[in-house]
Image (cartoon, grey):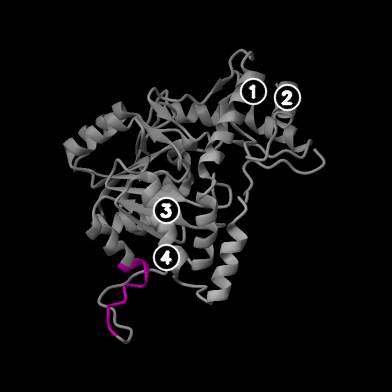
Amino acid sequence: MRQRLFLSPPEMGGNELGYVEEVFASNYIAPLGDFVNQFEHTMRHYTGTSHALALSSGTAAIHLALRVAGVGAGDIVLASSFTFIGSVAPILYQNALPVFIDCDESWNLSPTLLKTAIMALDKPPKALILTHLYGQCAKLDEILAICNEEHIVLIEDAAESLGAFYNDQSTGTFGDFGVFSFNGNKIITTGGGGMLIGKHEEAIEHARFLSTQAREPFPYYAHNTYGYNYRMSNVLAAIGVGQMEVLESRVQKRREIFSWYQEALGDIEGLEFMPELPNTKGNRWLTTARLPQGANPLEIVKHFEAYNIETRPLWKPMHMQPLFANATRFVDGSSESLFAHGICLPSGGAMERKDVQAVAQILREAL
């Protein structure tokens, strides 16, 4: 490739620059402004949620969800092991104890192992952080039923799955809290940022209070507790408003790219793409696949680099990370196998069929 082909580069939709110019003209650069309010309104309307809070990152949103849910020192927080560190690091911020749950054939959290973990632990878990991996829905009906039965707060990490729907309902809206990310590589981006959504007004408003340094409503700075500098700026929110205008077309294009990969690589024996559950529509943020037995993802990545193409192994499970060497885990080898044999392929929305065909041909060479 003459120009580097990235895994998932940012794309602008057309109106973002105009909205940013409006922000500059108003001089409401930060911390808040009309576009922050508009971005939250757009997110509420798109997802069908009741309340939304624009923040500096998805990790900040998870942190606030845990604190608002009352998670504190020594509490048990269950979490998907097959995920990114930002999904679970906030457990440590609260001095809570992470307990990792493996995935199943869906590549997302296993309800069976979730139930096993709850029964085996010596005290009830306070919350579950459920990741919808690579934009594909987890088994929400089963997982939500378990959480309701066991009185566990469900935090949906939908950072990768904006635009994905389970039984025609947006991911992030099933649990007590939902979290989205607008990092530079996501399906839409503000360069950096996140959103916390939820059903309960009091909880989201408490998170809003904490996100602005827990400042009390006085004409001077007064603080009865500590908070965080977690709010999104008006500039980034203006970009987000423009990005939301093209979200549906982005999802459609990523799904089309996935179909091109299926067509180009579907005949390779032993190669398996991440599945899509019945009655769900993933956003196919990234096209991901398990390679045939014997293929080494690190060698494949190195082969692609020679062509100036970015690829990446699948997430290294959290229970395999040195940081969590002593953490409790309920695993059966599923995510370890995916990490050992899986790869993420370039999926940027600007890709054309010929780009996918070129990637497919290079993958065949590498195999």
Q: Amino acid at mark 3?
A: Thr
For residue 230, the mark is 4
Q: CA distance from mark 2 to mark 4?
A: 44 Å
Q: Amino acid at mark 2?
A: Ala
Residue 4 x/y as whole percent = 75, 43
The secondary element bearing badge 2 is classed as: helix
Q: Which residue is mark 1?
A: 295
Does the CB distance between marks 4 and 1 fall below 8 Å? no
Residue 60 visible (yes or no): no
For residue 42, the mark is 3
Q: Residue furthest right?
A: 2
Of residue 360 and residue 304, the one placed in the foreground of this image is: 360
The secondary element bearing badge 1 is classed as: loop
Q: In screen coordinates, is 104 left or right of 184?
A: left
Q: Which residue is mark 2?
A: 366
Q: Amino acid at mark 1?
A: Ala
Does the CB distance between marks 2 and 1 fall below 8 Å? yes
Nearer the observer, disc 3 or disc 4? Answer: 3
Does the CB distance between marks 3 and 1 fall below 8 Å? no
Q: In screen coordinates, is 258 left or right of 140?
A: right
Dividing the picture into quarters, in which one does residue 118 lie? top left
The secondary element bearing badge 4 is classed as: loop
Q: CA distance from mark 3 to mark 4?
A: 20 Å
